[in-house]
């Protein structure tokens, strides 16, 4: 494992940076993206803030009311997720186009890992990291930070180390020293709860963690304790996992017995639509094109598609578009059906632009 070269790229104050790019008059001012403050009575949270606002102590996940108290003059903007999703998709495409056959894993709207082992050296990987950053800046006018190390753990911490607009390499020989003084909170899986437990044991830094007997950590943190100690020494075998792009979500079903019974067919059709809809929502996509498919008992297959004016994730729109395609198909014939199906495609992503999440099979079929 020690000979891997892993790169982590994370956009700088992503939502706020996109807003600043869209409206250059925001530059140099404190910008907060999130819920609206409503004069300090707003109930939501901050999604992110730019670096000027961070100087006032405003950061992600803090109540918007607290952000308002910290700097009421800041520019407060609502979240425009569809815009960020589009930008994110373009950035990922830039990286994909430059990274050839390297494994690439997008892990959130603004960050991804690449396995650069094939580049052969950390020096070459650093040049490649700079190439990515330059390409993103040239094409999107946004800055990214890159970290490179021998594991995901090190690469991620390294990308944070020289933020914003930095590129930092941690060579395998200095990994343990690099981690030594960092707070335990930097380790993946250590959230507020585990941090409190560790602090209770007097463990603040990664060195403190290394100096604590394994039994003590395991007694308080269970099995995760063992993993924590490995992480403390920079041991992180997690691989970069490439994901597939979801191009469509569909369901179809073959009737156990060919049927002409309109109630059975319609009931099943709506059930399929519902399943497709649930998967669409769980992926936080919107779709533009819907297709219905049906096969008669003589195996003759037909499909009909319709593209909406605008992408949608509303059940009522999906249902009515599906029915408009399907109902005529079965009213105009007296033939018996063997198979029916529905599929949606041409996605835009609503919240996470990770049109590549999901390792589940995309098309499912069943028999009823
Ligand atoms: P991050 O990469 O964690 O933060 P960031 O890009 O704003 O800042 P940094 O320069 O430190 O990387 O998250 C990416 C985006 O995800 C962020 O711009 C807004 C969103 N986000 C939330 O909506 N809520 C949150 O709690 C966090 C952490 C991020
Ligand atoms: Mg970021």
Image (cartoon, rainbow, N blue to C red):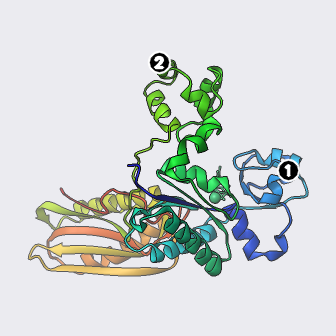
Residue 361, quarter of the rendered image:
bottom left
Q: Residue 220, labelled with which disc?
A: none
Residue 354 seen anywhere in this rendered image of the structure: yes
Residue 132, quarter of the rendered image:
bottom right
Q: Is mark 2 within 8 Å of ligand 1?
A: no
Of 338 and 144, which appears nearest the observer?
144
Q: Which residue is found at the position 61% from the left and 80% from the top?
A: 139
- Element assignment for label 1: loop
In the image, is 124 to the left or to the right of 67?
left
Is 113 rendered above or below residue 298?
Answer: above
Q: Residues within 10 Å of mark 1 (few under 14, many from 20)?
A: some
Q: CA distance from mark 1 to mark 2?
A: 41 Å
Of 355 and 337, which appears nearest the observer?
355
Q: Residues within 10 Å of mark 2 (few under 14, many from 20)?
A: few
The residue at the far front in this view is 173
The quadrant of the picture showing ligand 2 is bottom right
In the image, is 52 to the left or to the right of 224?
right
Give the mark, 1 or 2, whose residue is nearer the N terminus. 1
Q: Which residue is found at the position 74% from the left and 54% from the top?
A: 35
- Element assignment for label 2: helix
Q: Residue 56, labelled with which disc?
A: 1
Q: Position of residue 228 (x, y in %)?
A: 50, 33
Q: Position of residue 19 (x, y in %)?
A: 73, 69
Of 358 and 294, which appears nearest the observer?
358
Q: Which residue is found at the position 49% from the left and 74% from the top?
A: 93
Look at mark 2 in the image and give the residue it sits on: 215
Residue 193 seen anywhere in this rendered image of the structure: no
Q: Which residue is found at the position 73% from the left and 48% from the top?
A: 44
Q: Position of residue 232 (x, y in %)?
A: 53, 36
């Amino acid at each position: 494992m020690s000979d891997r070269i892993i790169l982590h790229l994370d956009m700088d104050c992503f939502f706020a940076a996109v807003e600043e790019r869209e409206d250059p008059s925001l530059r140099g001012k404190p910008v907060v993206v999130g819920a609206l403050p409503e004069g300090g009575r707003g109930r939501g949270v901050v999604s992110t803030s730019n670096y000027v606002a961070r100087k006032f102590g405003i950061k992600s996940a803090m109540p918007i009311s607290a952000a308002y108290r910290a700097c009421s003059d800041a520019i407060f903007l609502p979240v425009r997720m569809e815009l960020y999703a589009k930008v994110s998709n373009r950035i990922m495409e830039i990286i994909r186009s430059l990274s050839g056959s390297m494994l690439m894993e997008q892990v959130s709207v603004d960050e991804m890992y690449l396995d650069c082992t094939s580049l052969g050296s950390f020096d070459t990987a650093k040049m490649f990291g700079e190439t990515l950053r330059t390409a993103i800046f040239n094409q999107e006018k946004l800055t990214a930070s890159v970290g490179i190390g021998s594991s995901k753990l090190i690469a991620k911490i390294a990308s944070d180390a020289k933020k914003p607009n930095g590129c930092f390499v941690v060579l395998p020989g200095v990994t343990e020293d690099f981690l030594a003084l960092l707070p335990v909170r930097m380790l993946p899986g250590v959230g507020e709860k585990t941090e409190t437990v560790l602090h209770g044991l007097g463990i603040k830094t990664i060195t403190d963690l290394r100096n604590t007997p394994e039994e003590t950590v395991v007694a308080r943190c269970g099995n995760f304790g063992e993993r924590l100690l490995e992480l403390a020494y920079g041991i992180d075998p997690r691989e970069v996992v490439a994901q597939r792009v979801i191009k469509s979500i569909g369901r179809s079903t073959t009737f156990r017995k060919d049927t002409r019974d309109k109630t059975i067919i319609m009931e099943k059709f709506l059930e399929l639509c519902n399943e497709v809809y649930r998967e669409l929502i769980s992926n936080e996509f919107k779709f533009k094109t819907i297709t219905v498919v049906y096969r008669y008992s003589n195996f003759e297959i037909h499909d009909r598609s319709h593209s909406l004016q605008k992408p949608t994730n509303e059940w009522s729109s999906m249902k009515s578009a599906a029915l408009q395609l399907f109902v005529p198909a079965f009213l105009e014939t007296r033939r018996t059906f063997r198979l029916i199906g529905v599929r949606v495609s041409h996605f835009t992503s609503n919240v996470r632009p990770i049109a590549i999440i999901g390792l589940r099979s995309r098309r499912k079929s069943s028999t009823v």
